[in-house]
């Protein structure tokens, strides 16, 4: 008696489980906007920018503390006063952007969500790239809203003493956009630091230390090497992207583009280090 064994088809259905980069971007956007820290941080950036612009504009327009005669200054200098008041809030907004950048990645390590993220994207680096891209775009948009809102407030205040600035002029629009760009760069730089340290407290301390503490310490050191190193610090070069008169004696040591290159170098080091450690360490 012959037993007939049914043939098993060699063609098995294949299932595609790979996630495209567009899908990773969409996932990171959902995670970013679902965090309560994101809404609060961006609201603080807008509030700080507009509030500090109002305070600075009122102080400058009223000539407090023996300030310059703004109404009697040349037209180009008048526009510069309006711009300086408009971007003044970025000094404080950069701290909020830095904290948010750290929390975006460190929060996933705290909650354990990073395991799900890396399971969905086994190669890992696309997940970091998508997170950085989403954070950069979102922060730039919010930063632009904040700086343009600050410019509107400053313009209304200065209009009371017949001082104005034309937003269409390159010397006005470029610093406004540069301030928003700097906030986005700070967020991505902090993201890289947070990914390397994988700790909210450690990442925030490191970022704020590099932004605030390091330049202050260098300014206090009575040595030529410290003075020469100061323009290369992240925050000093970053301020040089969009300011000329209010960022300190070393902010305009280089041109806008060279300052931007220096800042991008810091970001490249941060993100590269984060990508290297992300692929080598366990979640």
Image (tube, rainbow, N blue to C red):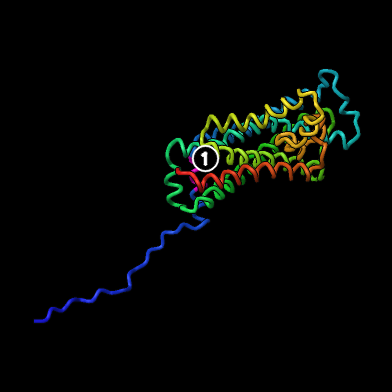
Hey, which quadrant is residue 259 in on the image? Answer: top right
Secondary structure found at label 1 = helix
Q: Nearer the viewer, residue 44 or 196?
A: 196
Q: Is residue 15 left or right of residue 272?
A: left
Q: Is residue 34 left or right of residue 13?
A: right
Q: Name the main secondary structure of what is drawn in magenta.
A: helix
Q: Is residue 245 visible?
A: yes
Q: Is residue 270 left or right of residue 24?
A: right
Residue under pointer 1: 105
Classify mark 1: residues with Cα within 10 Å, few (<14), some (14-19) or many (20+).
Answer: many
Q: Residue 33 in magenta?
A: yes
Q: Residue 124 in magenta?
A: no
Q: Which residues are magenta?
A: 28-34
* Residue lying at 52% horizontally and 56% vertically, measured from the top left: 21
Q: Nearer the viewer, residue 231 or 129?
A: 231
In the rendered view, tell whether residue 149 sits above or below residue 56: below
């Amino acid at each position: 008696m012959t037993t007939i064994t049914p043939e098993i088809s060699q063609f098995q259905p294949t299932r595609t489980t790979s996630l495209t980069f567009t899908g990773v971007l969409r996932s990171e956007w959902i995670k970013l906007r679902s965090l309560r820290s994101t809404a609060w941080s961006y609201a603080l950036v807008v509030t700080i920018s507009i509030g500090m612009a109002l305070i600075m504009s009122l102080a400058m327009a009223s000539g407090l503390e023996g300030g310059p005669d703004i109404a009697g200054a040349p037209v180009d200098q008048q526009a510069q006063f309006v711009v300086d008041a408009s971007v003044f809030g970025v000094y404080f907004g950069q701290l909020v952007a830095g904290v948010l950048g750290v929390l975006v990645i460190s929060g996933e390590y705290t909650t354990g969500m990073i395991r799900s993220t890396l399971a969905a994207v086994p190669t890992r680096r696309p997940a970091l790239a998508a997170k950085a891209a989403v954070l950069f775009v979102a922060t730039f948009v919010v930063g632009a809203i904040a700086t343009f809102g600050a410019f509107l407030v400053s313009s209304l205040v200065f209009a009371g003493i017949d001082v104005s600035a034309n937003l269409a002029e390159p010397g006005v629009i470029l610093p406004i956009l540069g301030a928003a760009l700097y906030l986005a760069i700070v967020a991505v730089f902090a993201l890289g630091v947070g990914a390397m340290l994988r700790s909210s407290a450690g990442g925030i301390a490191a970022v704020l230390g590099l932004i605030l503490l390091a330049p202050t310490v260098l300014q206090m050191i009575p040595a030529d090497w410290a003075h020469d190193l100061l323009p290369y610090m992240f925050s000093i070069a970053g301020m040089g992207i969009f300011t000329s008169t209010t960022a300190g004696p070393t902010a305009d040591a280089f041109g806008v583009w060279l300052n931007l290159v220096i800042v991008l170098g810091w970001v490249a080091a941060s993100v590269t280090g984060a990508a290297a450690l992300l692929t080598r360490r366990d979640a």
